[in-house]
């Protein structure tokens, strides 16, 4: 009888151990847990990225997906962004949405994620490879078309003559490269000469201001200028004010933030080409959700861009993009 009782108690201990939950796992989500997806932007300080985050998180809440938002502190820190992707791959995240800082350098870690059967969506800025093959989908503005829109408007403001200055963003950024080439093509087609087209703003408004101040002679001779992202546009505005040139050149910038919207309203900017970053975050998470459900995802999705001027900035559909 004692042997029987002892055997029964040992069996109960082993059964109890087998049923005890092991606690939260860093691996793929179980059928009873929310899927975890990582969204990695180029940086986390610009207003643009905060809007992407808002769209991603709202969609995650709607779909029952945990969104982990983490990006480099500086928008030129390729090494940190690569490290973040590697970390999430090691943690066996369920899905990954990435805005690559460099169209080539992030390729190997995205391939690593795919080798672990982690679906990857690329957003905002392209990655070398074929959407739908090398990654699930590319979700972004048609940046070359957006740059052409900026160039056409700047050429019109300049009356199709004179010299313009272009302040580029950073080397290796596919999205801004496309905007810059699109703008340059439109300006050339309209007969506008780019007196400066090889200067880079860097990742912050402060660095952009310093670069712009070192271009003072070219800016004094120019009739117009184009900046290809939020921080470059903001830095150029600060430099023009310090140089006494604010409002004296035709100026088309890119993206929206409170300082840029105020500058547009006050006449220190003539136009902004504005994207829909909240939609970009939303569609990135939706695409990952579809892939996790083994559903088909469009290989490329254009989130759109519009030209905003003082004349149309208060129209409801435009004003919504400026908030």
Image (cartoon, rainbow, N blue to C red):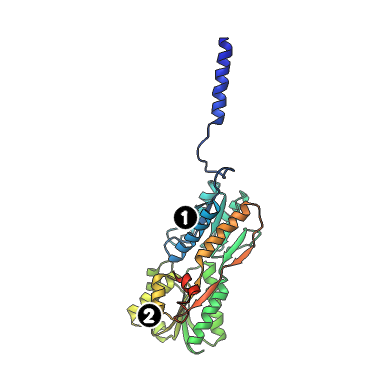
Depth check, mark 1 against mark 2: the one in front is 2
SS class, disc 2: helix
Q: Is residue 183 above or below residue 25?
A: below
Query: Which is nearer the eye, 223 or 149?
Result: 149
* Observer able to see residue 168: no
Q: Where 190 falls versus 285 (above or below)?
A: below
Dot 1 or dot 2: first in sequence order is: 1
Quarter of the image that includes the C terminus: bottom left
| Disc on res. 173 | none
Q: Residue placed farthest to the front in the image?
A: 316
Q: Residue at x 42, y 83 (%)?
A: 218
323, 111: nearer the viewer:
323
Is residue 301 something one can see in this rendering? Answer: yes
Residue at point 45% right, 81% down?
225
For the point 52% across and 41% down, the residue is: 25
Residue 97, x across and y down, in percent: 55, 57
Instruction: Please rate how many residues cluster around mark 2, counting C-alpha atoms within 10 Å: few if below 14, some from 14 to 19, many from 20.
Output: few
Residue underneath mark 2:
266
Say if 71 sits above or below 184 in the image. above
The quadrant of the picture occupied by the N terminus is top right
Comparing 31 with 162, the one in front is 31
Badges 1 and 2: C-beta atoms under 8 Å apart?
Answer: no
Residue drawn at the location 45% of the way across and 62% of the way down: 50
Q: Position of residue 182 (x, y in %)?
A: 56, 77
Tag 1's secondary structure? loop
Q: CA distance from mark 1 to mark 2?
A: 35 Å
The image shows residue 139 at horizontal and vertical percentages of: 58, 64
Q: Callout 1 environment at 10 Å: few (<14), some (14 to 19), or many (20+)?
A: some
Q: Which mark is residue 70?
A: 1
- Whether residue 47 sits left or right of residue 25 in the image: it is left
Q: Position of residue 153 (x, y in %)?
A: 51, 83
């Amino acid at each position: 009888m004692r042997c029987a009782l002892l055997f029964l108690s040992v069996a109960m201990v082993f059964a109890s151990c087998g049923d005890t939950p092991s606690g939260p796992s860093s691996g793929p989500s179980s059928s009873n847990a929310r899927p975890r997806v990582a969204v990695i932007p180029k940086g986390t300080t610009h207003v643009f990225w905060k809007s992407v985050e808002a769209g991603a998180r709202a969609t995650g809440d709607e779909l029952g997906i945990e969104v982990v938002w983490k990006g480099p502190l500086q928008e030129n820190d390729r090494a940190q962004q690569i490290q973040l992707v590697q970390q999430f791959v090691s943690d066996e995240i369920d899905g990954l949405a990435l805005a690559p800082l460099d169209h080539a350098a992030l390729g190997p870690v995205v391939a690593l994620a795919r080798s672990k059967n982690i679906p990857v969506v690329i957003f905002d800025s392209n990655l070398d490879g074929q959407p739908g093959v090398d990654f699930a989908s590319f979700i972004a503005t048609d940046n070359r078309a957006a740059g052409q829109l900026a160039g056409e408007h700047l050429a019109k403001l300049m009356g199709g003559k004179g010299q313009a200055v272009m302040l580029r963003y950073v080397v290796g950024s596919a999205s801004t490269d496309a905007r810059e080439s699109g703008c340059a093509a439109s300006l050339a087609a309209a007969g506008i000469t780019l007196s400066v087209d090889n200067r880079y703003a860097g990742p912050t408004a402060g660095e952009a201001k310093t670069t712009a101040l070192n271009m003072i002679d070219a800016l004094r001779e120019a009739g117009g200028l184009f900046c290809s992202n939020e921080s470059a546009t903001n830095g150029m505005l600060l430099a023009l004010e310090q140089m006494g040139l604010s409002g004296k050149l035709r100026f088309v910038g890119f993206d929206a933030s409170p300082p840029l919207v105020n500058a547009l309203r006050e006449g220190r900017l003539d136009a902004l080409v504005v994207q829909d970053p909240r939609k970009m975050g939303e569609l990135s998470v939706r695409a990952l959700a579809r892939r996790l459900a083994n559903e088909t995802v469009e290989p490329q999705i254009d989130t759109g861009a519009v030209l905003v001027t003082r004349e149309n900035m208060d129209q409801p559909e435009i004003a919504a993009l400026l908030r």
